[in-house]
Amino acid sequence: MRIEALSGWTREQKHVVVASFLGWTLDAFDFFLLVFVLKDIAKEFGTEISNVTLAIFLTLAMRPIGAFLFGRAADRWGRRPTLMVNVLLYSLLEFASGFSPNLTVLIALRALYGVAMGGEWGVGASLTMETIPPKARGFVSGLLQSGYPTGYFLASVVYGGLYEYIGWRGMFFVGVLPALLVLYIRRNVPESPGWEPSDTTHGNTLEVVKSHWRLALYAIVLMTAFNFFSHGTQDLYPTFLQVQHGMSPHETSLILIVLNIGAICGGLTFGAFSERLGRRRTIIIAALLSLLVLPLWAFSESAVYLAIGAFLIQFMVQGAWGVIPVHLNELSPDNARGTFPGFVYQLGNLFASVNATMQADIAKHFDGKYSIALAGVAGTVAVVIAILTFFGKEAKGVVFGRARPTP
């Protein structure tokens, strides 16, 4: 739809987009492998599903630490080497999770994985947005964010095709494969043209946050709502299909593949639209449209209608998300672009990290009706996102770098 935005690109710019897209795709792939096997882990370790969801909670809660550490490293030593270390670390921790002898060790490893996962998004997004032509930002933003549902899609395929042969531990072993991406980055990806070496310190970070505290507070609240929007419609959806509808791994996998095709299409579509409509207006439209498909998504009984609802809800949810990489980078202060977008995003993840446990408890309260928990969270945050975005700032097309004019 926006192929003209990609004309005139250098070879290096294309490699940067590919690497950042794959980094986020494979990060999400590793994260979502867990959500398919919550029931199996609970059975092996003799506990309830709600207890296993603590692993998801800690993964999300630890992501701000990773965003801060890797973000500051990216501002000081460069986006490229930081991204390489980041990808290697989350891959190895995913692999180690498959050896967990008990729930405590698994939860500890998933917390460390959360630190590694927290760094990838901000570093990859800043590297990309500083490298590509400004006219391509909207489309590429949607492309980058579609890496998240693409990772979910790949996890769905692996679950449907391999789970019965490799079990839940084997799912984690497969998660080491993203480490190979480091070789591609090392060979093909240049450093960001918008990065300059700096003596980045903890104090400097606090100064940036202090001088932009209103923007930081707004972005954190917005990203909290956004993370409830995505995790509230994704993390327990496999459990919803397995427990409430009694679906097999194969059926669950097929519906989730459809769900993620919708998410990918939504991210690309609304990301591209944001170049014409503006970032804020596009987010508001996508969020409000999600309300129309909530009943079909959460309360259908047949597999066909559930699949249609899953496609449509994620088209809207990830459509709104498709604008976020460019929107946060355009709002970000120049001297903290390696840190600010990822840090506020992951702080939002921290505050939304209770989602899986909260939804599991709500479902338990309503006799296993996950549909009520899913619809309640998704509907509420869709309205909140629309309101917050309406009162936010539009920064579409702002100039990056030291040449940026002072507002």
Image: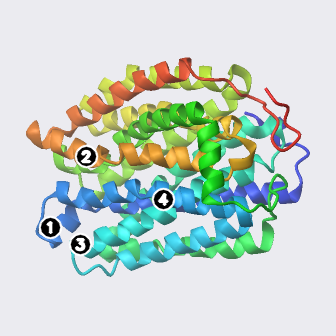
Q: Which mark is residue 104?
A: 3
Q: Hey, which quadrant is residue 113 in on the image?
A: bottom left
Q: Residues within 10 Å of mark 1 (few under 14, many from 20)?
A: few
x, y percent for residue 192? 80, 57
Whether residues under marks 4 and 2 lie with C-beta atoms below 8 angstroms apart, the answer is no
Q: Which mark is residue 65?
A: 4
Q: Could you say whether the residue bearing mark 3 is in a helix, strand or loop? A: helix
Q: What amino acid is labelled 2 in the image? A: Leu
Along the line of sight, the residue nearer the viewer: 312 or 205: 205
Q: Could you say whether the residue bearing mark 4 is in a helix, strand or loop? A: helix
Q: What amino acid is labelled 1 in the image? A: Lys
Residue at coordinates 66% horizontally, 56% vertically from top-left?
Answer: 124
Which residue was labeled with disc 2? 241
Query: As displayed, is residue 218 above or below residue 39?
Result: above
Q: Which mark is residue 43?
A: 1
Q: Quadrant of the C terminus?
A: top right
Q: Left or right: 173 with respect to 18?
A: left
x, y percent for residue 114? 43, 62
Q: Earlier in the sequence, mark 1 or mark 4?
A: 1
Along the line of sight, the residue nearer the viewer: 281 or 168: 281
Residue at coordinates 34% horizontally, 40% vertically from top-left?
Answer: 232
Query: As displayed, is residue 282 above or below residue 399?
Result: above
Residue at coordinates 65% horizontally, 56% vertically from top-left?
Answer: 123
